[in-house]
Image (cartoon, rainbow, N blue to C red):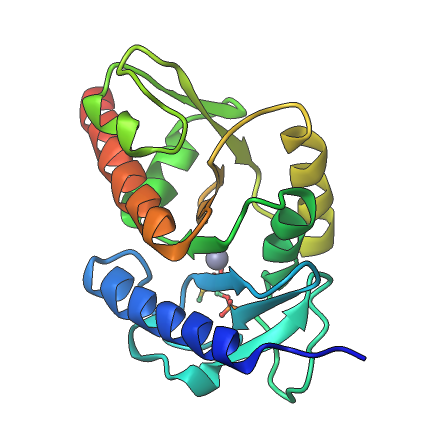
Amino acid sequence: MTVIDLEHLARAQQAIVEAGRELHAAGQVPATGGNFSVRLDDRYMAVTASGRHKGCLTPADIMVTDFAATPFGSSLKPSDEARLHGQLYEDNSFIGAILHTHSRAATVLSRLESSATLWLSGYELQKALEGVTTHEARVAIPIFDNTQDIAALAEAVRTRLADETCCAYLIRGHGLYTWARNMTACLRHVEALDFLFECELALRR
Ligand SMILES: CSCCC(=O)C(=O)COP(=O)(O)O
Ligand SMILES: [Zn+2]
């Protein structure tokens, strides 16, 4: 029988509500863009329901699904992109939180960069990313073409990330996915990556 730790769920919901407020205020999730999740255990996640405005979430907007995005104990519709979250949790036991954002910089830069990888190097702030210790590192951010076929995209991400170490990917003309061991580190990734994307855009102008 499946048992969800309700205290853990309540903490996850609160972390997601607060992340939504912060990210909306920072211009990272305009309109109803973006979706967020927190791992509950090795099968389930707390994830935003579809179509919610991320700046004014309440705990009731955050539901439980398994990693296949099947709702558990809820009649809400999960995020259209919930399977992208589930795929990352399935394949990476260290991941505790995932944020998907739709900033202007991520949207524009992923369209300007026509190759399948955005390379970041030479920035002190890249050390805000997990595992990066020097401005001299070359940080790869994979770029996937946008699609409405989320199951196919999740498989493409799975295949590519099996061979590459990274802490984020871009979907072209769409936005950013980033992950970390917990929500605090994940929020830091969003802030740092968006700063780096803005820098890249300025350099390419
Ligand atoms: C208006 S944003 C289009 C859908 C999207 O890309 C997104 O991030 C939000 O989808 P969700 O189903 O999670 O609300
Ligand atoms: Zn999106």
**Above or below: residue 120 compared with residue 190:** above
Of residue 41 and residue 99, the one placed in the foreground of this image is 41
Of residue 114 and residue 99, the one placed in the foreground of this image is 99
Residue 163 percent coordinates (x, y)? 66, 23
Residue 128 percent coordinates (x, y)? 28, 33
Residue 72 percent coordinates (x, y)? 69, 80
Q: Residue at x 43, y 55 (%)?
A: 99
Specify whether residue 74 is in view: yes
**Above or below: residue 173 compared with residue 112:** below
Q: How many marks?
A: 0
Q: Is residue 139 left or right of residue 159?
A: left
Specify whether residue 149 is in view: no
Of residue 47 and residue 7, the one placed in the foreground of this image is 7
Q: Residue at x 39, y 33 (%)?
A: 130
- The residue at the far right in this view is 1
Q: Residue at x 46, y 87 (%)?
A: 60
**Above or below: residue 17 compared with residue 164:** below
Q: Is residue 176 left or right of residue 150?
A: left
Q: Is residue 60 left or right of residue 26?
A: right
Q: Give the quarter of the figure containing the N terminus.
A: bottom right
- The residue at the far top in this view is 136
Q: Give the quarter of the figure containing the C terminus.
A: top left
Q: Quadrant of residue 29?
A: bottom left
Of residue 68 and residue 131, the one placed in the foreground of this image is 131
**Above or below: residue 117 compared with residue 63:** above
Q: Residue at x 60, y 24 (%)?
A: 164
Residue 41 percent coordinates (x, y)? 63, 62
